[in-house]
Image (cartoon, grey):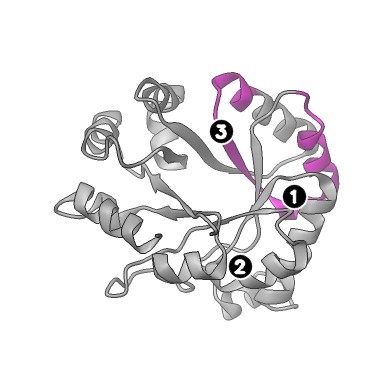
Amino acid sequence: MHKTELIVALDTRTLKAAETLMEKLEGQVKYFKIGSVLFTETGPAAVELVHKRGGKVFLDLKFHDIPNTVKGAVRNAAAMGVYSVSLHLSGGAEMLKACAELEKRPKLWGITVLTSIDEHDLFRAGFRCGITKTVKQLAALGRECGVDGVVCSPLEVHILKKLHDGKLCLVTPGIRPAAAGDDQKRAVTPAEARQSGSDFIVVGRPIIEAEDPAAAAAAVLKDLK
């Protein structure tokens, strides 16, 4: 049976809040996402915290720059011992190849189209092919250039699963319990993400902002079984 892993987003403003959350989730969650808010506040200390508590880090800084700059950033992330990093597939082939060719590197997970973006947003940003075609094109570029996985909405997972036959790890944010509602325009429930074939789901606010984060995480994990 296909297994879907949970990544909890440590989208807290302070290191202390991140540590408190991890304490509550101890024994349940193995993977944690560190994004730009926490990293710009605490730097590598956030990564060290997760490693100290036995977790694995998805460093979600969405690198997008000239090839040599992103290659250097990924090299530095590797030195910190993170499990995976994110980088924008729209950065182009040379940027992606420069990172993939590093001898020692974390998993490279390429960003396709952010889950906060809908068709209108994408069109206004200058992409004229629509979300589905844009995601397919970017994922194909990523695989061609050596990335290990792609970050996409669960709404595109089944398409990419079929096209790439398990050759790309599929990471899906925008996961929300059925009753939740916020700025994620292309969100689905944990169970729907599992059924569509997600390898990892990323969950933030529904766990972080819950009165009982441990119970909220347990409910998500139950949905993934």
Q: Nearer the viewer, mark 1 or mark 2?
A: 2
Look at mark 3 in the image and give the residue it sits on.
83
- The first of marks 3 and 2 along the sequence is 3
Q: CA distance from mark 1 to mark 3?
A: 21 Å
The residue lying toward the viewer, choosing from 30 and 85, is 30
Q: Quadrant of residue 127?
A: bottom right
Residue range corresponding to the magenta coloring: 76-103
Q: Foreground residue, 40 or 162?
A: 162
User: Does residue 60 sit above or below 207 in this rendering?
Assistant: above
The disc label shown at residue 202, or none: none
Query: Compared with residue 173, is residue 6 higher up or lower down, i.e. above or below?
Result: above
Circle 2: residue type: Val
**Crowdedness of circle 2 by 10 Å Cα count: few (<14), some, many (20+)?**
many
Q: Position of residue 112 (x, y in %)?
A: 65, 60
List x then y, in percent, for residue 32: 42, 39
The total of numbered circles placed on residues is 3
Q: Residue at x 50, y 70 (%)?
A: 195
Q: Which residue is mark 2?
A: 157
Pointer 3 and pointer 2: residues touching (CB < 8 Å)? no
Residue kind at label 3, given as amino acid type:
Tyr
Q: Which residue is mark 1?
A: 91
Looking at the image, tell me whether mark 1 or mark 2 is earlier in sequence order. 1
Q: Above or below — where is 213 with respect to 107?
A: below
Q: Is residue 47 left or right of residue 82?
A: left
- What residue occupies the far front of the structure in this picture? 1
Q: Residue at x 34, y 24 (%)?
A: 53
Q: Amino acid at mark 1?
A: Gly
